[in-house]
């Protein structure tokens, strides 16, 4: 019973990591790669650690594994947020298939402060922003 | 509220001490037992928020896990097949969450759901900017997140 559960969970975890690595290869732009990688890797590593926690009857192994899962879930979204924000601030272009960019033109040019109100000079066209015009720019 | 939670923890530790096996299933059973005992004991008390909150938190965790698995399958399908089905976009999302803890948990949950990624939060802490992979209509996405994830999270927290 426990064996079957562990087999199912670890298979799903391994597949999640596999799809994350395939996603790095296949996704067309930086944000999508980040989006695919962080979550799938968190889920994959989390599931494998959960298997380790269930497999070993030793309480110290279980508590350590669960603590690692906890800190992984806490820290990885923050890492993703910081990387994504840095990429946007340095002007990494979005994929050409991007349909809307409501963040464009909302940063203060000098200070990098994100205002809630739309700045006046870019009010006209919020959807345009930094979306790449051609295929080459995204690669 | 916090008193009842500590009482519940104490009861579950007593259960663990009496049965003598420190294993998480046993601890969980003790917690449930303590919860039931406290529920019966406080039938006439004024403050019964704790007993609404614990089921809500548990149901939120399961709802979140279900959403995460569902979205993971969608992303995995898109990665496997040669055509791209995604329509990415950056959406402005006005939050209902107000305190730091609520904002932190909400952005964590949104970031952990595959397909969505927090890019930034505005200076006055009222709006999030979310990069979404499968975006049909920004208004619809904001509406769905508001009535689904955020409402459940705030119900569990408040």
Image (cartoon, coloured by chain):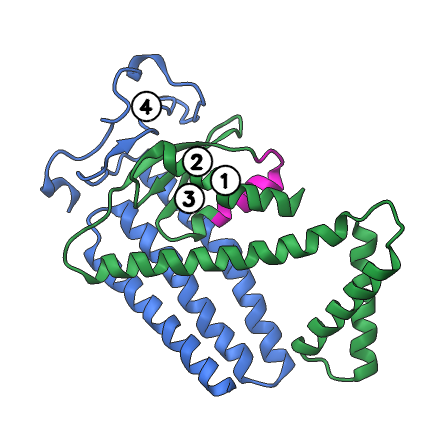
Chain colours: A blue, B green
Say which mark, if any, is on residue A105: 4
Left or right of residue B44, residue B36 in this image: left
Which image quarter holds the C terminus of chain B?
A: top right
Residue B114 forms part of the magenta stretch: no
Q: CA distance from mark 1 to mark 3?
A: 27 Å
Q: CA distance from mark 2 to mark 3?
A: 26 Å
Q: Secondary structure at mark 4?
A: loop
Circle 2 residues within 10 Å: few <14, some 14–19, many ≥20: few
Left or right of residue B74, residue A72 in this image: right
Q: Nearer the viewer, mark 4 or mark 3?
A: 4
- CB-based contact (under 8 Å), mark 1 and mark 3: no
- CB-based contact (under 8 Å), mark 2 and mark 4: no
Q: Secondary structure at mark 1?
A: helix
- Part of the protein shown in magenta: B97-109
Q: CA distance from mark 1 to mark 4?
A: 29 Å
Q: Which residue is mark 1?
A: B147
The vertical placement of A130 against B36, above or below, is: above
Say which mark, if any, is on residue A82: 3
Q: Which residue is mark 2?
A: B143
Residue occupying image coordinates x 87% and y 55%: B42
Q: Nearer the viewer, mark 2 or mark 3?
A: 2
Which of the pair A110/B109 is nearer the observer?
B109
Q: CA distance from mark 2 to mark 1?
A: 6 Å
The vertical placement of B114 against A4, above or below, is: above
Residue B108 forms part of the magenta stretch: yes
Residue occupying image coordinates x 82% and y 55%: B4
- Residue B157 position within the rendered picture, expressed as x and y whole percent measured from the top left: 65, 45
- CB-based contact (under 8 Å), mark 2 and mark 1: yes
Dominant secondary structure of the magenta stretch? Answer: helix
């Amino acid at each position: 019973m426990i064996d079957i559960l562990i087999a199912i969970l670890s298979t799903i975890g391994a597949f999640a990591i596999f799809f994350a690595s395939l996603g790095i290869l296949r996704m067309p732009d930086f944000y999508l790669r980040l989006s695919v990688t962080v979550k799938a890797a968190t889920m994959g590593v989390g599931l494998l650690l959960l298997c380790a926690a269930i497999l070993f009857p030793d309480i110290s192994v279980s508590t350590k594994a669960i603590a690692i899962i906890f800190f992984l879930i806490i820290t990885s979204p923050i890492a993703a947020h910081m990387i994504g924000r840095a990429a946007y601030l340095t002007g990494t272009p979005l994929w050409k298939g991007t349909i809307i960019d409501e963040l464009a033109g909302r940063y203060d040019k000098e200070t990098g402060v994100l205002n809630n109100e739309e700045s006046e000079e870019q009010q006209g066209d919020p959807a345009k922003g930094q979306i790449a015009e051609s295929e080459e720019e995204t690669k | 509220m916090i008193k009842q939670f500590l009482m519940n923890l104490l009861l579950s530790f007593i259960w663990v001490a009496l049965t003598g096996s420190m294993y998480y299933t046993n601890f969980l059973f003790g917690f449930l037992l303590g919860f039931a005992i406290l529920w019966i004991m406080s039938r006439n008390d004024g403050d019964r928020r704790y007993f609404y909150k614990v089921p809500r938190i548990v149901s939120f965790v399961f709802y979140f896990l279900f959403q995460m698995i569902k979205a993971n399958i969608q992303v995995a399908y898109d990665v496997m097949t040669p055509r791209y089905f995604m329509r990415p976009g950056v959406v402005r999302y006005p939050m209902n969450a107000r305190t730091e803890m609520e904002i932190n948990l909400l952005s964590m949950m949104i970031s952990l759901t595959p397909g969505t990624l927090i890019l930034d939060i505005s200076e006055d802490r009222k709006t999030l900017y979310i990069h979404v992979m499968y975006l049909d209509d920004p208004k619809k996405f904001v509406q769905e997140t508001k009535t689904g994830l955020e409402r459940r999270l705030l119900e569990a927290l408040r």
